[in-house]
Amino acid sequence: MALIYSIFAVTVSSQVRGGKQETLCAHIHGPTKPVNLTITLEMGPEKTTILEQAVDKDFYRCLNFQV
């Protein structure tokens, strides 16, 4: 059976805490066209990009980041 839809998932703790290290996982399965994945942490007026990645095939990555 051919996959008609792409599947996108990003997981991270629901309660990130300042000064702690957290883990984020991103998964894209079966992209039908190239996509640019950008994951940004927003706290108040500050924005920090955690991951920027061009994706054109199945992708799975977990990484640690400092809050």
Image (cartoon, grey):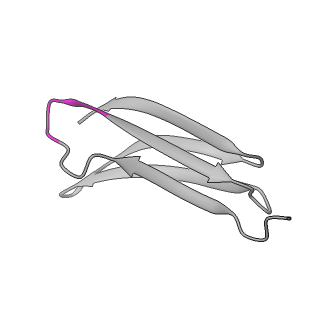
- Does residue 34 belong to the magenta stretch? no
Q: Is residue 31 above or below residue 23?
A: below
Q: Is residue 63 above or below residue 37?
A: above
Measuring 68% from the left and 46% from the top, which residue is drawn there?
54
- Does residue 19 belong to the magenta stretch? yes
Q: Is residue 31 left or right of residue 26?
A: right
Instruction: Residue lying at the far front in this picture: please name it.
Output: 1
Relative to the observer, which residue lies in front, 44 or 66?
Answer: 66
Residue 18, position as x, y percentages in the image: 14, 37
Residue 30, position as x, y percentages in the image: 74, 56
Instruction: Residue lying at the far left in this picture: please name it.
Output: 18
Q: Work out which quarter of the rendered image holds the N terminus and state it.
A: bottom right
Residue 38, position as x, y percentages in the image: 52, 51
Residue 40, position as x, y percentages in the image: 39, 51
Q: Which residues are magenta?
A: 17-22
Q: Is residue 6 left or right of residue 4?
A: left
> Which quarter of the picture shows residue 34?
bottom right
Q: Work out which quarter of the rendered image holds the C terminus and state it.
A: top left
Measuring 41% from the left and 44% from the top, which residue is drawn there?
49
